[in-house]
């Protein structure tokens, strides 16, 4: 899908999904929302299809409330992304405009960092589709990961400073090195060493990780949305802070 502004006109170009123009096709929307978030549906089939893409894009799976009973639906993308089963039986994904997190500096009444406020943000913008570039998301994620690794390693060195030559110190250094390699590869670090656990926890706190015990920096594209009801278990404060810090960190 593409949006093209040309000589005062906005043109939307979209590939045709088999049967999408049929009225009955609305029943084939099995993921996302077709009414701007008033109702949201989800599908295990789309979970399997979108999970790997969400991981690559640093997107955080999140849950939204879908009825008055408090039932929730799990999403791997923005609620505005739609999953449709075409008349040919294939699975299609539409409306990816909000795949990346929003640029809160151009959302009216949005929360921003103190540094952003000093620079005059948030500022008015002609539309609400201001989103961050994927390149920025990748760079921010990489920078936070490097910061995490350096802080965890520094904490361990500080703890072992008094016993540099002991075999125990060597074993702990090897243990934390292995754990940090696992973190850099996107895996959960497996460790039973208390010093390593403490180092990972302190580094996680410093980089505002979503998890308290290891590195977890991912982004919920819906965390600033006011049209969907977020599930009680979602830590919106942490999720919003990561998005706010993407451009101007505190």
Image: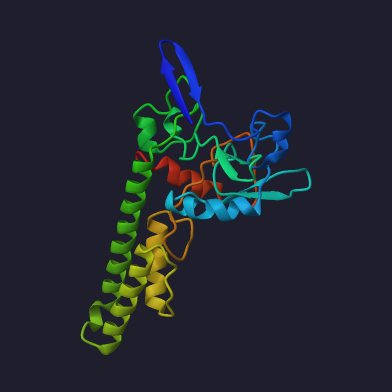
Q: Residue furthest top?
A: 7
Q: Is residue 207 above or below residue 229?
A: below
Identify the image quadrant of residue 201: bottom left
Q: Position of residue 109 (x, y in %)?
A: 51, 29
Q: Is residue 81 above or below residue 161?
A: above
Residue at 27% over, 78% down: 160
Q: Is residue 93 left or right of residue 65?
A: left
156 or 54: which is nearer to us? Answer: 54
Residue at 52% over, 47% down: 237
Q: Position of residue 150 (x, y in %)?
A: 28, 62
179 or 2: which is nearer to us? Answer: 2
34 or 239: which is nearer to us? Answer: 34
162 or 116: which is nearer to us? Answer: 116
**Can residue 249 be seen by looking at this rendering?**
no
Identify the image quadrant of residue 186: bottom left
Residue at 57% over, 56% down: 48
Q: Position of residue 208 (x, y in %)?
A: 42, 54
The image quadrant where one finds the C terminus is top left
């Amino acid at each position: 899908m593409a949006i093209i502004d040309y000589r005062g006109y906005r043109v939307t170009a979209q590939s045709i999904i088999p049967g999408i123009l049929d009225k009955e096709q609305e029943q084939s929307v099995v993921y996302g929302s077709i009414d701007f978030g008033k109702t949201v549906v989800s599908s295990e089939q789309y979970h399997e299809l979108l999970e790997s893409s969400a991981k690559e894009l640093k997107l955080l799976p999140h849950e939204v409330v879908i009825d008055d009973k408090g039932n929730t639906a799990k999403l791997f993308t923005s609620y505005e992304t739609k999953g449709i089963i075409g008349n040919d039986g294939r699975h299609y994904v539409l409306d990816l405009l909000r795949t990346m997190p929003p640029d809160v500096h151009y959302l009216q009444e949005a929360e921003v960092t103190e540094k952003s406020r000093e620079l005059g943000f948030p500022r008015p913008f002609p539309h609400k589709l201001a989103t961050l570039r994927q390149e920025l998301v990748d760079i921010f994620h990489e920078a936070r990961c490097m910061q995490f690794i350096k802080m965890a390693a520094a904490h361990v060195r500080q703890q072992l400073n008094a016993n540099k030559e002991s075999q125990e110190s060597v074993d702990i250094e090897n243990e934390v090195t292995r754990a940090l390699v696992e973190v850099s590869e996107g895996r959960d670090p497996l460790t039973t060493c208390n010093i390593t656990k403490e180092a990972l926890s302190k580094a996680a706190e410093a980089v505002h990780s979503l998890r308290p015990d290891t590195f977890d920096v991912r982004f919920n594209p819906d965390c600033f949305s006011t049209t969907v009801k977020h599930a009680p278990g979602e830590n919106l404060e942490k999720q919003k802070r990561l998005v706010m810090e993407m451009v101007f960190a505190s």
